[in-house]
Amino acid sequence: MRQRPTLAFILVTVFLDVLGIGLMIPVLPTLIGTMTQSPDQQAYWYGALAASYGVMQFFSHRCWARSVTSTGGDRCCCFPFSVWASATS
């Protein structure tokens, strides 16, 4: 019976990761195209930003998992939402 919440958490996590990539793929070529002149520069910067997104995901996961384990999930989940709420208001 404990397996169902774990599966839901994993599916939500995968959904958020795919959502980040899904937002990056359609918007990034247009954004880079306005800031560079040649197609070679566009390809270079698109690859660099896509690779940095993956590297950031890899390293931030370790820090985030360690902080959730040491302080508890409620405190760690409330902090990003409070930062987002203060930034958008």
Image (spheres, rainbow, N blue to C red):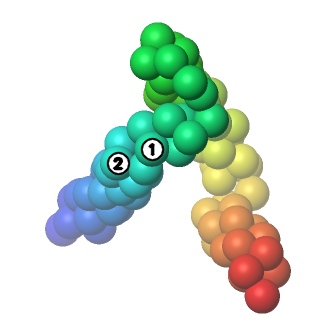
Residue at (78% x, 88% y) in the render: 89
Callout 1 secondary element: helix
Mark whose residue sits in front, 1 or 2: 1
Please rate how many residues cluster around mark 2, counting C-alpha atoms within 10 Å: few if below 14, some from 14 to 19, many from 20: few
Establish if 33 lies above or below 80: above
Please rate how many residues cluster around mark 1, counting C-alpha atoms within 10 Å: few if below 14, some from 14 to 19, many from 20: few
Residue type, label 2: Pro
Gap between marks 1 and 2, in whole Å?
Answer: 8 Å
Q: Residue furthest bottom?
A: 89
Residue denoted by label 2: 26
Image x and y of residue 79, in percent: 75, 68
Q: Tell me if label 1 and label 2 are in contact, CB under 8 Å.
A: yes
Image x and y of residue 52, in percent: 58, 25
Residue at (81% x, 80% y) in the render: 86
Camera-side residue of 67 and 22: 22
Question: Does residue 53 appear in this view?
Answer: no
Residue type, label 1: Thr
Image x and y of residue 22, in percent: 33, 50
Question: Does residue 56 appear in this view?
Answer: yes
Residue denoted by label 1: 30
Please tell me in which quadrant of the rendered image residue 45 appears: top right
> Quadrant where the N terminus lies?
bottom left
Question: For this view, does 79 lie left or right of residue 5?
Answer: right
